[in-house]
Image: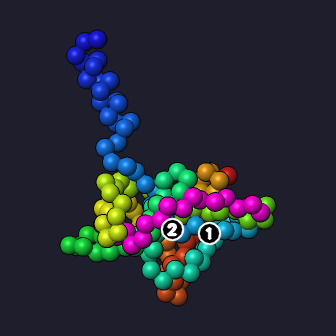
């Protein structure tokens, strides 16, 4: 192999393998009736009942930590408030499905209580709704009578 080919191959390998562990930043999981999920339309609002932006850090099949939005030095971040090592359980009911509200991926060197994760690259206004590892809809966060809610922007068919 010549030097240029080796350099390209090394660059590809480094891009595939990140330096820091990556986690999914999401709102708390919610169960919703399957029939309601099928009727979901653009403009619908899902009330979450949250007073503050409390989120989860998840990897593919487990919840790793609870985090909360904090402001530090004119920047926002997510502070880990509780470590959790809980598998994401699927519903055993045919009537209900688990719904994930995903903001995106964040990288974090250590998971420890009090650690603040940089979220400058995350748009906290935009949320992706995922059920059974399939994207259901694109949405945005809205405020409804002082509570956090999700407004459906576009439904994926």
Q: Is residue 28 visible?
A: yes
Q: Residue at position x 53%, y 57% from top?
A: 62
Q: Residue at position x 38%, y 56% from top?
A: 106
Image side of residue 25 versus residue 114, left or right: right
Residue 150 on the magenta segment: no
Secondary structure at badge 1 equals strand
Q: Is residue 126 visible?
A: no
**Colour style of the rendered protein structure:** rainbow
Tag 1: Cα neighbours inside 10 Å, few (<14), some, or many (≥20)? few
List x then y, in percent, for residue 98.
65, 62
Residue 30, numbered circle: 1
Residue 133, numbered circle: none
Q: Which residues are magenta?
A: 78-93
Most frequent secondary structure within the magenta stretch? strand
* Marks 1 and 2, how far apart at CA: 9 Å
| Above or below, comparing residue 100 to residue 4 in the picture | below
Rendered image quadrant of residue 6: top left
Residue situated furthest bottom in the rendering: 145
Residue 84 on the magenta segment: yes
Instruction: Pick the quarter of the image with the N terminus.
Output: top left
Task: Give the labeled residue for mark 2.
Answer: 27
């Amino acid at each position: 192999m010549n030097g240029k080919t080796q350099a390209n191959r090394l660059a590809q390998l480094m891009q595939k393998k990140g330096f820091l562990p990556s986690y999914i930043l999401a709102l708390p999981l919610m169960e919703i009736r399957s029939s309601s999920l099928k009727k979901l339309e653009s403009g619908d609002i899902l009330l979450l009942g949250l007073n503050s932006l409390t989120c989860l850090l998840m990897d593919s099949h487990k919840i790793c930590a609870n985090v909360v939005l904090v402001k530090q030095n004119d920047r926002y971040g997510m502070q880990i408030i509780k470590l959790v090592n809980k598998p994401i359980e699927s519903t055993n009911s045919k009537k209900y499905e688990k719904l994930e509200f995903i903001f995106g991926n964040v990288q974090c060197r250590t998971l420890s209580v009090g650690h603040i994760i940089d979220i400058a690259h995350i748009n906290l206004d935009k949320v992706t709704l995922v059920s059974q590892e399939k994207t259901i809809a694109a949405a945005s966060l809205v405020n409804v009578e002082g509570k956090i809610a999700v407004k459906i922007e576009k439904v994926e068919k």
